[in-house]
């Protein structure tokens, strides 16, 4: 795929550079989300073959449908990398944030990644957008238009303005100079009261959907002005010293040359159970039943036990290894402060090789069900403070324990003492029970090694 030369006009953009911001700690969609599994990884959208896809899978598929040559880079924390590889494969680009530092450092790091690592011409434009909007294909066509407008260089930033459907207090507002499709921006207004929002809409204001385009050289220049660094690697290494600040506050509020393009297609922010259930095609996902007296009820159940709802109205019921939620849909928007008080280890997570679910926790033991995808393997590793036992439930593969290789199948048992190096490699999908035994069981008790051969 050829890249555009410096200074060359872009009569027709043949590909897009897109940065997807994948943040969030997953508190508002508890118990299906947690500190590792944010909302964008929950599989709730049913496909034609009956399987389900997540928000990030849906957005990635839509991008590739509109532009198969698009360069997609996901800016995210290291805790989400495994889930991204699990759901999107190994070919997607990832700009890994060593720690959370808000959107300006994240966007600066991703921009440096495109320029210094992927060697994309700084004259090219990039579109930055959230990883989790609920949109149709016309949204991604609009992203192309946004990139083409940024190519023209009439403004340093080109924003997407969402045509508002009601006076929301949840969104910021962009007030354009004119009513044209593409307009210079007069001013920004952060999340106002409903009454003030109604006044803004009367003035032609648009919702700020957190989508914008710019030439790579612009943000590289702004980043160098605000942060002292040499290149991507240098910025990565000093990332934990950077000030936490949003892109809006660090860059947008200080930029005078800003344009906005209107978007009037479907756009939903699925940030709460209330809005998420509105986008669901089914009322029940997983084992769940409700009687005819139920109205506007949704059940999402990841457990192997049935959920029964009777005579309920406007309620969401969600169950996972993390816990059970039963909530009025409107009240579900206020879930976060309650979930913040829970002190619980991660009970479910997707890894690059598959997934695991914690079944039982005792004072000196933990029992986990592990699923490895065909052709995948755990890291070769050891634990200092615990023994482990693997019982193979189904599938075939092989284990390597201190260099000794063994083919395994359903019914086989493998024991590993503390300190020994071990891994398991799946030939087919491989399911096993892992029992961890020790006085001090911790996720940090793990040392990785290269295989000896």
Image: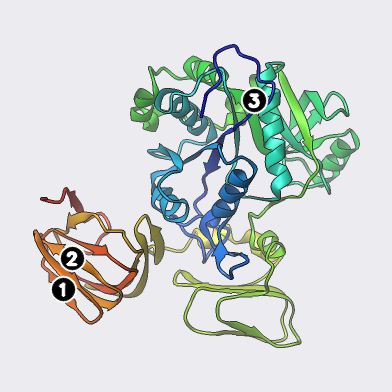
- The 10 Å Cα crowd at callout 1, few under 14, some 14 to 19, many 20 or more, is some
Q: Say whether disc 2 or disc 1 marks the residue closer to the N-terminus.
A: 2
Secondary structure found at label 1: strand
Secondary structure found at label 2: strand
Where is mark 2, residue-wise?
Answer: 399
Marks 2 and 1 in Cβ contact (< 8 Å): yes
The numbered dot on residue 414 is 1
Mark whose residue sits in front, 3 or 1: 1
Q: Quadrant of residue 391?
A: bottom left
- The 10 Å Cα crowd at callout 3, few under 14, some 14 to 19, many 20 or more, is some
Where residue 386 appears, x then y in whole percent? 16, 65
Pick the front one: 289 or 238:
289
Where residue 273 appears, x then y in whole percent? 64, 63
Mark whose residue sits in front, 3 or 2: 2
- The 10 Å Cα crowd at callout 2, few under 14, some 14 to 19, many 20 or more, is many
Q: Say whether disc 3 or disc 1 marks the residue closer to the N-terminus.
A: 3
Confirm whether residue 151 shows in the render. yes
The reply, left or right, for residue 16 in relation to residue 194 is left
């Amino acid at each position: 795929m050829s890249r555009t030369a410096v200074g060359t006009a872009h009569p027709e953009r043949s590909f897009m550079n897109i940065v997807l911001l994948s943040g969030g700690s997953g508190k508002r969609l508890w118990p299906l989300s947690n500190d590792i599994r944010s909302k964008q990884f929950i599989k709730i959208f049913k496909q034609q073959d009956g399987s389900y896809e997540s928000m990030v899978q849906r957005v990635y598929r839509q991008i590739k449908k509109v532009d198969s040559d698009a360069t997609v880079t996901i800016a995210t924390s290291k805790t989400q990398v495994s889930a991204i590889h699990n759901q999107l494969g190994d070919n997607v680009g990832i700009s890994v944030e060593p720690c959370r530092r808000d959107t300006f450092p994240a966007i600066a790091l991703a921009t440096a990644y495109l320029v210094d690592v992927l060697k994309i011409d700084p004259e090219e434009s990039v579109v930055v957008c959230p990883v989790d909007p609920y949109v149709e294909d016309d949204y991604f066509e609009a992203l192309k238009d946004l990139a083409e407008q940024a190519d023209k260089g009439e403004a340093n930033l080109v924003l997407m303005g969402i045509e508002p459907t009601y006076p929301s207090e949840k969104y910021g507002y962009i007030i354009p100079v004119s009513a044209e499709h593409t307009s210079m921006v007069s001013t920004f207004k952060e999340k106002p009261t409903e009454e003030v929002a109604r006044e803004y809409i009367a003035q032609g204001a648009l919702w700020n959907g957190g989508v914008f385009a710019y030439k790579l050289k612009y943000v590289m220049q702004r980043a160098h002005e605000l942060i002292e660094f040499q290149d991507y690697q240098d910025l990565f290494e000093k990332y934990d010293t950077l000030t936490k600040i949003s892109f809006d506050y660090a860059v947008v509020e200080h930029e005078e040359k800003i344009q906005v393009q209107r978007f009037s297609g479907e756009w939903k922010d699925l940030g709460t159970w209330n809005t998420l259930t509105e986008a669901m095609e089914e009322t029940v996902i997983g084992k769940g039943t409700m009687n005819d007296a139920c109205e506007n009820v949704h059940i999402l159940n990841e457990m192997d036990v049935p959920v029964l709802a009777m005579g309920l109205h406007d309620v969401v019921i969600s169950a996972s290894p993390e816990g059970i939620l039963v909530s009025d849909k409107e009240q579900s928007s206020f879930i976060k402060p309650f979930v913040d008080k829970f002190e619980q280890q991660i009970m479910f997570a997707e890894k690059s090789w598959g997934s695991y679910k914690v079944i039982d926790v005792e004072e000196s033991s933990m029992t986990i069900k592990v699923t490895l995808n065909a052709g995948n393997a755990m890291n070769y590793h050891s634990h200092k403070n615990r023994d482990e036992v693997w019982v193979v439930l189904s599938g075939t593969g092989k284990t390597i324990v201190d260099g000794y290789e063994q083919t395994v199948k359903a019914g086989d048992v493998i024991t590993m003492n503390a300190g020994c190096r071990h891994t398991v490699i799946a030939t087919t999908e491989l399911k096993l029970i892992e029992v961890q035994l020790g006085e001090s069981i911790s996720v940090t008790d793990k040392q990785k090694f290269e295989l000896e051969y």
